[in-house]
Structures are given as structure tokens and as C-alpha cells.
Amino acid sequence: MARYTSLGKVNGVEMKILRDTGATLDLICNKYVKPHMYTNEKVWLRTPLEESLICLPFAEVELDCEMGHVITKAAVLRDSLDQGRYLLGNKTAALLEDYKTKEDVQMHMINAVQTRAQKKLLEVENEVQGQSIEQFDEELNDDLPDEKKSIEEVWLQ
């Protein structure tokens, strides 16, 4: 487990951060969260050990570790489940990976879901935008005088 564990600060408290590759969301124990950090959002989870769903509140969490610094949201567990670790899920891990490539940028995580329809719409918009650029280039080439076109052809050869 040491391979997936690192030291960091969560809400200013130094603790072990366990990278859980099987978890989508981050998990933190209630004793590390102050009342003003709760976001009034909730999430329903099913654990591998229980068949029933449990409802957990979200809290805004400041995470500072070797992978970077980020303000994210984590589901809050009751104190009896405390093992002194912050469970780092896939969403925040991906956010921290992006953070590595974009230095000097502080990111805030927003829990959002992109539906298939939204993804399809975005792909169509990108495709249309790409076609618009190609059409614009063609229009520019059509507007060029024949002399300049022949000069460009010589340069390209």
C-alpha cells in the first residue's frame, strides 16, 4: 500500500493520502471538515462491502500534496470510519495531472456530468468549427491573385 500512499496536507492537516484507483470521488473523515466547508450537496454511494446505498454530504477540501495544490470536493465519512487517510479518487487525480501541465494555475473542481448528448453536441460543434476554418482558407485562396498562387506553388515544390 506504500506505493499508493503519499504525505500531504488536507485542510491544513498533515496526513497520508491514499490513491484509490477504484474510486471516482474523494473521501474524507468528518473530523477534518469544519461546518462552513459543507456544500449542501449529497452523493449516494454503494460500497463493495454493502448492498445498500449510503448518502454522504460533500465538503470543499483544500488538498496540498506532491502532485500539486487543488481545491476540490470530497464525500464526508463519519468519524468511526477514520483511518487517518484521505482517499484520493480518479476525478481529483485527473485534475492534479492536468495541473502538472498547467503550472501557476489554481483549479477548482466542480462536480459535473457530461451526458452523451452533450458530448455529441460538443463533437459536432468542433467538427463544424473545423469545417468553417477549412472553408475560410479556401475562400482566402480563391481571393488571391493568380500571380501569388503561382508563386506559392513554386515555393511548395
Image (tube, grey):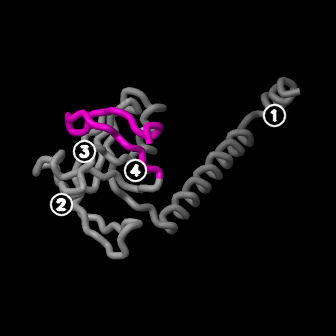
Q: How far apart are marks 2 and 1 (CA)?
A: 66 Å
In percent of width and height, residue 80 lies at 19, 57
For the residues carrying marks 2 and 1, which lies nearer the camera in this image?
2
Q: Where does label 2 land, which residue?
A: 40
Q: Is residue 7 located in the magenta-colored stretch of the structure? A: yes
Q: Distance between the residues labelled 2 and 4?
A: 20 Å
- Above or below, comparing residue 68 to residue 86 in the picture: above
Q: Is residue 114 visible?
A: yes
What type is the residue that disc 4 sits on?
Gly
Instruction: Tell me, yes or no, whether the two marked residues, 2 and 3, touch with CB atoms within 8 Å.
Output: no
Magenta stretch: give its range.
1-21
Q: Can residue 98 be seen in this view?
A: no
What type is the residue that disc 2 sits on?
Asn
Q: Where does label 4 land, which residue?
A: 89
Q: Distance between the residues labelled 2 and 3?
A: 14 Å
SS of the residue at dot 2? Answer: strand
Q: Distance between the residues labelled 4 and 3?
A: 13 Å
Counting residues from the N terminus, which is met first, the one under dot 4 or under dot 3?
3
Q: Residue at x 50, y 68 (%)?
A: 117
Q: Where does label 1 land, which residue?
A: 146
For the residues carrying marks 2 and 3, which lies nearer the camera in this image?
3
Instruction: Tell me, yes or no, whether the two marked residues, 2 and 1, touch with CB atoms within 8 Å.
Output: no
